[in-house]
Amino acid sequence: MRLTDYTDYSLRVLLYLAVRSEGLATIQDISDAYGISKNHLMKVVQRLAELGWVETVRGRNGGLRLFEHSSALTVGEVVRAAESDFTLVSCFNGSGSGEPGAHRECVIQSQCRLKGILEAAREAFFRELDRYTIRDIAEPASPLMSLLGLKPSATVVPIVPAPAAPAASAGV
C-alpha cells in the first residue's frame, strides 16, 4: 500500500506543529522546513482545520497551531482521514479485473483465499499505525526541532521565594 503525498503532508504538518508546540506557525514556516509547496500545504491545513485538529488564526499575526487534543491522535486516524481508497486489489471494490471499466467478477472469487490474506494485512497495517500518536512521533522534540530549523524555547525557571526568616523573639 502506498500512501499519497496528501497523507504524508498531513502527518508532517501535525508533526511540525506538535514539535513547535508554542506560538503560531505559518504555512510558509512549514513549507520552508520541509521544502513542500505552499499551495499543497494550504489544502492540507484547510482539511486539518475542518477536522478540528488545527486551529487557524487569521490576520497579520495569524498562523496555525495544533489543538491540544490533536497530539493524542493516532497516526492511523490521520491516515484514514487523509486517504480515500484502501483498495489493495480490484476485487476489493467489486471489480473482478484490473482493467479500466471492467465490471466482471473474478473467476476464482468463490475459492480465493488471497483476498482474506490481503484484508488481514491491511488490518495489521492499521493496528500498527494506531499504536502511535502524534505526540509519540514528536518526542523527543529537540533533535526534530533542529532538523526543522526551529529554536528550542527558553526554559522558564520558576522564581521560588526565599524561606521566611524566623521571627525575632521579643525581649531578647
Image: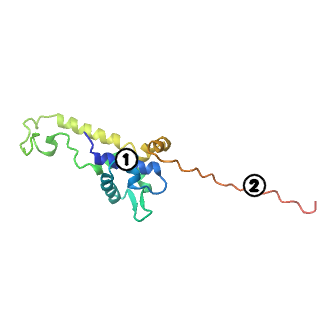
Question: Residue 31's spot in the image, x, y percent?
Answer: 37, 50
Quadrant in the picture for the C terminus: bottom right
* Marks 2 and 1, how far apart at CA: 48 Å
Tell me the amino acid under the disc marked 2: Pro
The front one of 47 and 115 is 47
**Residue 49, position as x, y percentages in the image:** 35, 58
Q: Which residue bears the numbered disc 1?
A: 12
Residue at point 46%, 45% (across, down): 149
The quarter of the displayed image where residue 55 is located: bottom left
Q: Which x, y percent locates residue 128?
A: 34, 39
Judged left or right of residue 65, residue 93 is left
Q: Is residue 53 left or right of residue 20?
A: left
Q: Report the side of 46 relative to 66 (left or right).
A: left
Q: Secondary structure at mark 2?
A: loop
Q: Amino acid at mark 1?
A: Arg
User: Which is nearer the N-term, disc 2 or disc 1?
Assistant: 1
The mark found on residue 163 in the picture is 2
Can residue 73 be seen by looking at this rendering? no
Question: Closer to us: mark 2 or mark 1?
Answer: 1
Where is the N terminus found, in terms of image quarters? top left
As drawn, is 148 to the left or to the right of 127? right
- Residue 117, by quadrant, is top left
